[in-house]
Image (cartoon, grey):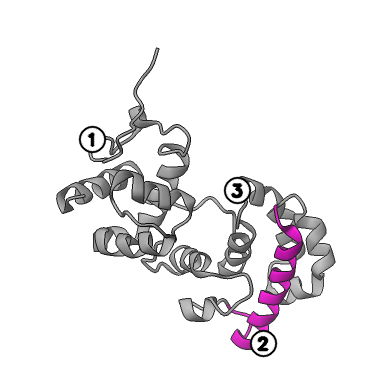
Amino acid sequence: MRKAAIRDMFDRFAAALPAPKGELRHADPYTLLVAVVLSAQATDVGVNRATPALFAAADTPAKMVALGEARIRDLIRTIGLYRNKAKNVVALSQALIDRFDGAVPADRDSLETLPGVGRKTANVVLNTAFGHPTIAVDTHLFRVGNRTGLAPGKTPLAVEQALEKAVPEDAKRHAHHWLILHGRYVCKARKPDCPACLIADLCAFKGKTTLGP
């Protein structure tokens, strides 16, 4: 995709939604980190149903460790892979206490040392909690990057690296949220809503949908 088209794309996103936000409910970097870990292979809606009770019981690393794995499992059992996620939540909370004085670190290398935290999770936390211009590639961003021609790549890392090169510097702070929301609600996997798309005329996708009877 040409630079002028990319510039136009993000100008349109910015005009339509100047301050995009993620949909996982959280109160601070720690609750965001836990919510993102819980969201792996699960929907934000499903996570948001479980976390109010969880965070009411434990909203700090120390409280979470004290709550214990068994009780956490009970509170998040509606979320996929809840057993392993409960184990990771306790382990990452203990690691925060042991190595970071209970605070969520604001750098990728440190975040990725925590149990259950990979590159995508680290990028979400860095962007949403700390304002870093990181772009976390999930299934939605992977699809949008490839489908539109904005950032083609065969792996999430390849798409992330392509986005880092393609996205204008002044758009990187919000690019993650613009693209994920676009993929979730407009550029959907099974049937993209091309007639409602802000960037349909810029998109390289050959299978665009049209208004039907």
Q: Is residue 89 above or below residue 19?
A: below
Numbered badge on residue 212: none
Which structural element holds mark 2?
helix
Q: Return the disc, 1 or 2, that comes first in the chain's sequence.
A: 2
Query: Does residue 16 show up?
Result: yes
Residue position for label 1 = 201
Residue position for label 3 = 43
- What's the distance in space between the residues labelled 1 and 2, CA to CA? 52 Å
* CB within 8 Å, label 1 to label 2: no
Seen at 61% across and 63% down, the residue is 37
Q: Is residue 11 left or right of residue 126?
A: left
Seen at 65% across and 52% down, the residue is 47
Query: Does residue 18 show up?
Result: no
Q: Position of residue 210 (x, y in %)?
A: 34, 23
Q: Which residues are magenta?
A: 80-103
Comparing labels 3 and 2, the label whose residue is closer to the camera: 3
In depth, the one of 195 and 50 nearer the eye is: 195
Give the crowd class for mark 1: few <14, some 14-19, many >=20 residues within 10 Å. few
Q: Position of residue 160 (x, y in %)?
A: 37, 62
Q: Position of residue 31 (x, y in %)?
A: 62, 64
Which structural element holds mark 1?
loop
Q: Is residue 211 above or below residue 69?
A: above
Q: Is residue 88 above or below residue 3?
A: below
In depth, the one of 10 and 157 nearer the eye is: 157
- What's the distance in space between the residues labelled 3 and 2, CA to CA? 30 Å
Residue position for label 2 = 98
Magenta run includes residue 86: yes
Magenta run includes residue 21: no
